[in-house]
Amino acid sequence: MPTLYGRRYSVEELRRRVGRMSQLAGIRASTLNDGMAQGVRVLDFHTGSGLRFSVLPDRGMDLGAAEWRGVPLVWHSPTGPIHPAYYEQEGLGWLRGFYGGLMVTCGFMNVAVASEDEGFFYGMHGRASYIPAGNVSYEAQWEGDRYVLRARGQVRETRVFGENVLLTRTVETELGSNTITIEDTVENQGFESTPYMILYHINAGFPVLDEESELLLNSEVTPRDEEAAKGLDVAKRGAAPTPGFQEQVHQHDVTPGADGYATAALVNRSFRDGGIGLMVRYRPQELPYFWQWRMVGEATYVMGLEPANCHVMGRGEERRQGRLPFLEAGETCTQRIQLGVLTSSQEIDEVEQTIKGG
């Protein structure tokens, strides 16, 4: 039975009050038609709780803009969600279309720094975010006493004489909800084993990120490099926009809860009455690494929360270190991510207790 506007309603009670359920919650399909974003399909979700977010089928079924009751939750870069035709593999070209947003998929043949491996060059963060999805569908319908909003699409990375990896992504929420579930099923449809790297780049922005923000996460922290080591003492803290700030990347050795899920939340308790936060839940059994991108520069003001199945020094280094993850021929794996908005001090306190194991 959905909870809406502080009250629980039966299916019949809601159906009698509206002519069409899109008055309360739904998915609207559209296509962007300006500048370098022209032609990008968008699925805009609204749940009735105040949560709104978009799914971008032409950008690998990634999640773009997100807000709660008009308050932005995520960082938007200057590039906007440009069309995948503008993808640049060389050097730092990936950044020319890194729009930020709620969740950008990095992979599948490389994650993080551009890398050479076995005679091939793999661009920064791979192609996944620039591959248009096929077999895209969406639906908003009653399933029992839940009004479910769901989108599904398939993203394939392949080449002749090479990999053939298919990701099937399902994005789901429901009427009255402040949470989103992303379920990815990945299959190696080739006949040989293939590397498979994935990182979920979740991009919290102002006002979730601000001077008083803190990262709630039960973890041991290791800096990636000397620059990150400079910020080790404040790794789990926000900061004001800082001129000349250099990005800091930290690895977190996370302790999961009894249900197998690990939880991380960036929260700003000083925002309005009770605070606001962005929460990420994932299963370390599927994604054994958690990376934090602390980037509190001017305009590039973002905290990346990043579950992954690999390290972030590129494919070639992963192979040299003996850590490169593989999918065998015909093998399938599944990753499940939950994203949620924390909208009160009570919700923040409850999540903090869960993270601490209370």
Image (tube, grey):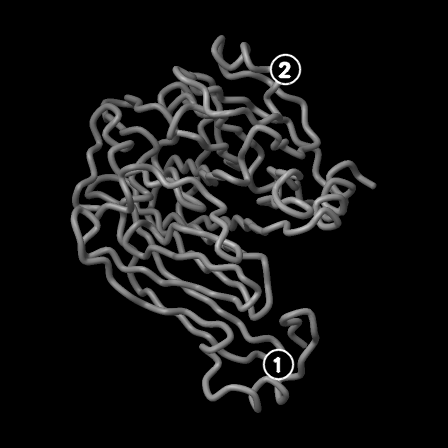
> Which residue has dot 1 on it?
144
- The image quarter containing residue 271 is top right
Residue for point 51% across, 25% down = 240
The amino acid type found where label 1 is placed reads Gly
Where is residue 87? Give x, y as percent.
Answer: 20, 39
Where is residue 272? Give x, y as percent.
Answer: 62, 45
Residue for point 29% across, 39% down = 127
Q: Which mark is residue 233?
A: 2
Of the pair 289 and 100, the residue shown nearer to us: 100
Q: Is residue 161 above or below residue 25?
A: above
Q: Is residue 356 left or right of residue 204?
A: right
Of the pair 357 and 48, the residue shown nearer to us: 48
The amino acid type found where label 2 is placed reads Asp
Crowd rating for badge 1 (residues with CA inside 10 Å; few <14, some 14–19, many 20+)? few
Residue 282 visible in this rendered orientation of the protein: no
Q: Secondary structure at mark 1?
A: loop
Label whose residue precedes the other's in the sequence (1 or 2): 1
